[in-house]
Amino acid sequence: MGFLGFGKKKRILDLTENYKRQLERAEQARASQKKSSDSTGAGPFSFFDSPSSNGSSDASNDISPLDDKKKKLAARILEMTEKLEDIGNQVYHLQQRLELLERKSDVKRI
């Protein structure tokens, strides 16, 4: 629809190729992740599970660095959730104080 030469496009810029490549990479990543999770039989939060008894008794007595990292991660997540709850309680108390101050100063009158 080029009226008097305006709006004519001699070149077409196709940006979908990059998008298609990103989709292919994402699909490949999902497939490889699914294969690895199927082979281990673990879910996304399997690090919270207790160690399985697939290993020998000597291996189960030793704490591997991976288990140590899992425990540290679980402790950090627990600490962060506790902090979020504390902050949520503080916000709630501040809201209550603000409402009390508004009632005392009779803000609705204005």
Image (spheres, grey):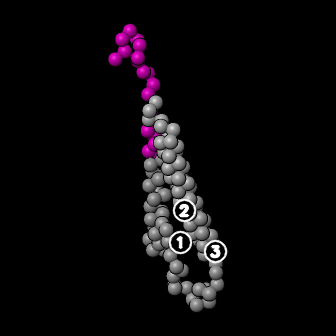
Mark 2 or 1: the one toward you: 2
Report the label total. Answer: 3
CA separation, marks 2 and 1? 17 Å
Q: Is residue 3 magenta?
A: yes
Q: Is residue 79 magenta?
A: no
> First in sequence: mark 2 or mark 3?
3
Residue 71 placement: quadrant: bottom right
CA separation, marks 1 and 3? 10 Å
Name the residue beneath numbered marker 1: 47
Which SS type dominates the magenta stretch?
A: loop
Position of 80 compared to 22: left or right? right
Residue farthest toward the left in the current orientation of the protein: 1
Q: Residue at x 48, y 35 (%)?
A: 107
Element at badge 2? helix
Viewer-nearest residue: 52 or 78? 78
Viewer-nearest residue: 92 or 35? 92
What amino acid is at disc 1? Phe
What amino acid is at disc 2? Thr
Q: Which mark is residue 68?
A: 3
Name the residue beneath numbered marker 2: 81
Residue 33's spot in the image, x, y percent? Answer: 48, 63
Q: Give the range drawn in magenta.
A: 1-21
What amino acid is at disc 3? Asp
Residue 98's spot in the image, x, y percent? Answer: 52, 45
Contact between marks 1 and 3 (CB within 8 A): the answer is no
Element at badge 1? helix
> First in sequence: mark 2 or mark 1?
1
> First in sequence: mark 1 or mark 3?
1
- Mark 2 is surrounded, within 10 Å at the Cα level, by few (under 14), some (14 to 19) or many (20 or more) other residues, namely few
